[in-house]
């Protein structure tokens, strides 16, 4: 697996990411993730819809909390042919608890804690920390990446409007 040196920063400190640099036009890699009920889910199960796929370090941090709440509000304004998936290394129990306390019902949270396939396949696994960098991928119904934002500073929020516009153009 390639290591991308100083790919992003966290609180101004350079960090390395494990995995490839995905680009618009690439096929969206599959990955096995863990749902809140501990069942395994493949990302490809969601292909066929427009997927806004976000990776966050932890739902229990202020920026990740704000981001996931925002996407939860925004997905309600999109077509039923769109889905928002938020992936973190948080344990499924913690994701379920967080969703309940935050009233997040439209975003599907999935955990990469077990296999780490998502982090490695999407190039967002933070080397040495075992967390995911903040990124947004928009995948079309055919499973092709149509938008990518790797947030350069992990503690910053993504460009919501750009990602949502990319999704709307596919619906």
Image: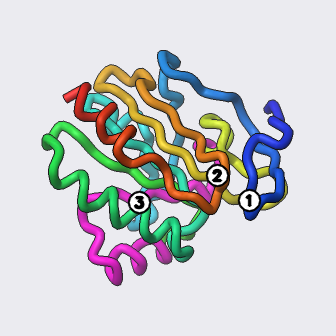
Q: In screen coordinates, is 137 left or right of 19?
A: left
- Nearer to us in this view, 163 or 88: 163
Q: What residue range appears in magenta?
A: 93-118
Crowding at mark 2 (Cα within 10 Å: few <14, some 14-19, many 20+): many
Q: Is residue 100 magenta?
A: yes
Q: Residue at x 70, y 29 (%)?
A: 20
Image coordinates of residue 49 in percent, x first then y, are: 25, 33
Separation of marks 1 and 3 at Cα, in angstroms: 23 Å
Residue position marked by numbered label 1 in the rendering? 10
Q: Is residue 108 magenta?
A: yes
Q: Residue at x 45, y 46 (%)?
A: 159
Point out the residue furthest to the top here.
25
Circle nearer the viewer, 1 or 3 = 1
Residue position marked by numbered label 3 in the rendering? 109
Point out the residue furthest to the bottom here.
101
Residue position marked by numbered label 2 in the rendering? 133
- Nearer to us in this view, 147 or 50: 147
Image coordinates of residue 44 in percent, x first then y, are: 40, 33
Q: In screen coordinates, is 52 left or right of 116?
A: left
Q: Look at the numbered disc 3 and give the secondary structure of its residue.
A: strand
- Sequence order check: which comes first, mark 2 or mark 1? 1
Image coordinates of residue 69 in percent, x first then y, are: 35, 66
Q: Give the quarter of the image for residue 48.
A: top left
């Amino acid at each position: 697996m390639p290591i991308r040196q100083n790919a992003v920063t966290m609180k101004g400190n350079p960090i390395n990411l494990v995995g490839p640099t995905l680009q618009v036009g690439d096929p969206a890699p599959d990955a096995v993730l863990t749902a809140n009920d501990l069942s395994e889910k493949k990302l490809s199960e969601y292909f066929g819809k427009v997927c806004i796929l976000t990776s966050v370090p932890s739902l229990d941090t202020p920026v990740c909390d704000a981001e996931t709440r925002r996407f939860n509000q925004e997905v309600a304004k999109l077509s039923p042919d769109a889905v928002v998936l938020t992936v973190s290394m948080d344990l499924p129990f913690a994701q379920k608890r967080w969703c309940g306390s935050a009233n997040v019902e439209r975003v599907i949270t999935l955990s990469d804690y077990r296999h780490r396939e998502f982090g490695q396949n999407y190039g967002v696994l933070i080397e040495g920390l075992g967390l995911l960098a903040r990124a947004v991928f928009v995948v079309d119904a055919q499973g092709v990446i149509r938008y990518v934002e790797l947030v350069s500073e992990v503690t910053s929020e993504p460009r919501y409007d750009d990602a949502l516009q990319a999704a709307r153009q596919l619906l």
